Image (cartoon, rainbow, N blue to C red):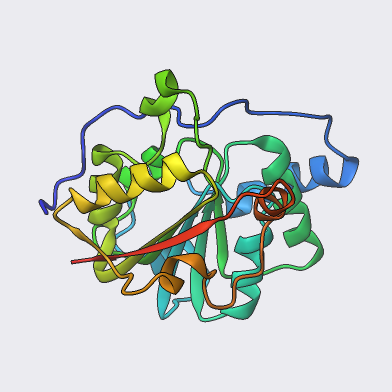
Amino acid sequence: MSSERPTRGSEAFFGRRKGKTLRPAQADALSDLLPRLRLDPETASPDDLSELYTRAFGTYRLEIGFGGGEHLLHRAHAMPQTGFIGVEPFVNGLAKCVAALAAEPLDNVRLYDDDATRLLDWLPEASLDQVDLLYPDPWPKKKHWKRRFVSPVNLDRIARVLKPGGLFCFASDIDSYVNWTLLHTRNHKQFSWLATCADDWRLAYEGWPGTRYEAKALREGRVAAYLTFKRR
C-alpha cells in the first residue's frame, strides 16, 4: 500500500443524526466530557496514536458505528492495555456512551462523532491492530447499496491504517450484506478471510458481550455471521 493518504472525498454512510430529546445527564455529558474525548481530523495527524491519550498502550483498536457503546465499553473495561477509538455519528447513541464514561471514566477510550472515512484518512498508516464494523446499517434496498460502508475504497482505507497482520472484524445478520462483504474482501488483495470451518463465522467472537442489534436479530429469527479478515 502507498503511504499516501486517500484524497477521495468522504461520504455519509449513515442515516439520521438525532432521535429523541436527550436526557439531562446525557446532554451534560456531551457538553462537558465529549470535548475532552473527541478526536479532531481537522488538526495535524498524530505521528503515533499514543499522542491521543494520557498514556501509551500496547495495542489500538477502532470500532466504526458503536451504537450506544455497549460493545466498545465492554471491551475497553476488559482490555485496559488497549487504546480504543469509537466512531458514532448518531447523537443519541453517542450521548449514551459519553454518559456512561462520565459515570465510570476510562482513560483508554477516545471518540469521534462524524463520518468514519474522515477519521480513517487522518489516522497514521499501520497504526491499528483491529478495526470492528459490527451490525452496520445494511442499506437493504439495492438502490442504496452504494451507501454500504464496505466498499473497495473503504477497504483501502481500513487496510492503510491496519498493521500487517491486523484484523478487520465484521458482524451482520443481513445475509445480503454478509455476502457483499465476503465478495468485496475476497477481491481485495490486502485481506484474507480467516475462516477454516463453519463455526469460525457462525460463533460470536471470543469475549463477545452481545449487542442490542444482535438481540433484535435473534428475536426476529435472523442468524448473524461473524467474519474475521487478516491484513496481509
The quadrant of the rendering that contains the C terminus is bottom left
Q: Residue at point 26% right, 67% down?
A: 163
| Direction left: furthest residue | 2
| Front-most of residues 146 and 93 | 146
**Location of residue 218 in the rendering, given as x and y in whole percent from the top left corner:** 69, 54
Q: Residue at point 30% right, 52% down?
A: 158
Relative horizontal placement of residue 24, taking residue 30 as reference (left or right)? right
Q: How many marks?
A: 0
The quadrant of the rendering that contains the N terminus is bottom left
Relative horizontal placement of residue 13, taking residue 211 as reference (left or right)? left
Relative horizontal placement of residue 110, taking residue 99 as reference (left or right)? left
Query: Quick check: 37 above or below 73?
Result: above
Q: Residue at point 44% right, 65% down?
A: 201
**Location of residue 127 in the rendering, given as x and y in whole percent from the top left corner:** 31, 64
Residue 185 visible within the image: yes
| Front-most of residues 111 and 148 | 148
| Direction right: furthest residue | 24
Q: Residue at point 34% right, 67% down?
A: 167
Relative horizontal placement of residue 156, taking residue 207 as reference (left or right)? left
**Location of residue 165 in the rendering, given as x and y in whole percent from the top left corner:** 25, 72
Which quadrant would residue 189 be assigned to in this image? bottom left
